[in-house]
Image (spheres, rainbow, N blue to C red):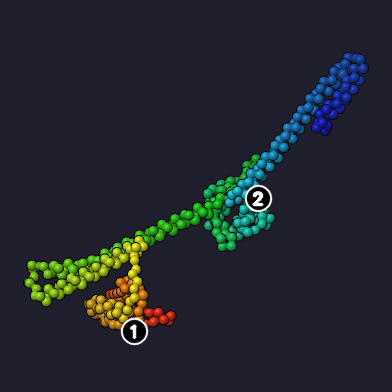
Amino acid sequence: FNLSRIPSAALIFASVVTSALAGAAFAIGSRSGLAAALLGTIYGFALGAMILKTHYETLQRASAQKALENQNEIIKLLLREFESGTKDWLWETDANGRLQYASERLSQLIGRPLDDVLGKPLLDVVCSGQPAQGWAEVEARMAGQLVIELVDVPLVNQGDVSWWQINAEPILSDQHEFEGYRGVAVDITETRRAADDMLAAKQAAERANAAKSQFLAVISHELRTPLNSILGYAELATSERHEPADEEEHADYLRNILEQSRHLNRLINDILDITRIEKGNLKLVEQEVDVDEVVGIIVRMCRIQARAASVELCESYETRGMVVQGDLTRLKQILVNIISNAIKFKPSDGRVEISVGQSAKGEPEFTVTDNGI
C-alpha cells in the first residue's frame, strides 16, 4: 500500500507474492492445496483492487488539494485586486476580538504598519481603547456575538476624520462555536460630508426664513406707523364731525402728512434697496462730495425727528473742507439711518452728535455719538 502511489510497482509486488503463494499451494496437489491456491489467487485480485482504489483516492486527494491551492491563490489575487482598487478595507478577528487580518488600507488610515496592529484588539487599534461615536455599538455587538450591520464609525488620523460603515458577521466552526468576526469597512466619508452639507444648508435656509419672517414683521410695523399717522391726519382734515379747522391747523395737518409721507417713502426706498442688493443690481454713482455740506444736509433732515423726540441733535467739525469720492445718495442714507436709530432709541432730553474728523490713516471719518442704550 505504501507503493500505491506508483500503482504498477505495487501491482507487480502484490502479483509476485500472491503468485508464489498460489504456486506453492498448487504444488501440494491435494484438495486443500488447490483450495489454498484458489484463495491465494482471489487474494491477489483483491489486493490489486485495493491498490487501485487507494491510488484513485490518492489522486482524488491530490486533485482536491491542488484545486484548494488554486482557489486560495484566486482568493488572494481577488483580495489584492480589491484592496488596490478600493478605499474600503477588510478585517478579521479571533474570538477575543484581536485582529488576525487587515487590509493595507487600514494601515494607511491609522498611520501604523500592519505588523504593529495584528494580534491587538480591533477597538484598541481604531480608537485607542476609547469607544467613540459608533464604535461603542460595534463593541456591544461583538460582545454579544451579533451581526454588525450598517454601523457608521469615525477614524481619526492626525486630526483628519474619515467615516466608515462597518458590516461583519460572526465566524462559526463546524461545531457552531464562535471563532471571531470577518467584515468589511466601506468608505462613506463623501456621503457623510454631503449629508452634513445638506443639513447645514437646511439649517441656513431655516435661519434665512426666520430672518425673513422677522424682517417682514418689523418692516410691516415700520410701514404701518407713518401710514396710520397719515390716515389719522387725513381723517381729521376731512371729518365732518369736527368744526372746520382754521388755516393754521390745516397747514399743521398737511405738514404732518407730508413729513410722514416722506418717511414712508424713505422706508419703501430702503426696502427696494435691499432687493437691489440681493439681486446685485445696486449701482453706485461716484462723485466728489463736500463733507461739510453733506453733514449739514443730514442734520437738517433729522432735526424734525429729533425735536419730536425731545432729543438734542448737534454737529461738530474737527477738520473742515474735506472732500471724499463716493456715492452722495448712499452716504446720506447710511448716516441718516444711523442718526435716526440713535434718535429713536434715546430717552427724552437725550443728545446725539455727528462729528467729522480724520482717522489715524488720515482718512475722513464720520462719528455718531449718543447717550442712549
Residue 44 location in percent, x, y? 83, 23
- The structure residue drawn at horizontal position 17% and vertical position 67%, both measured from the top left corner, is 231
Residue type at mark 2: give it: Tyr
Out of 338 and 141, give the one closest to the viewer.
338
Q: How many marks?
A: 2
- The structure residue drawn at horizontal position 66% and vertical position 55%, both measured from the top left corner, is 114
Out of 218 and 68, give the one closest to the viewer.
218
Tell me, for residue 101, which label it has, or none.
Answer: 2
Q: Secondary structure at mark 2?
A: strand
Is residue 354 visible in the rendered structure shown here?
no
Name the image quarter holding residue 118.
bottom right
Q: Is residue 74 left or right of residue 151?
A: right
Identify the residue position indicated by label 1 in the image: 320
Name the image quarter holding residue 357.
bottom left
Out of 58 and 243, give the one closest to the viewer.
243
Point out the image quarter for the N terminus: top right
- How many C-alpha atoms fall within 10 Å of the one at disc 2: few (<14), some, or many (≥20)? some
Residue 235 location in percent, x, y? 13, 67
Residue 221 location in percent, x, y? 26, 66
Observer-side mark, 1 or 2, equals 1
Q: Is residue 129 above or below residue 372?
A: above
Tell me, for residue 280, which label it has, or none.
Answer: none
Q: Is residue 246 above or below residue 41?
A: below
Q: CA distance from mark 1 to mark 2?
A: 82 Å
Residue type at mark 1: give it: Arg
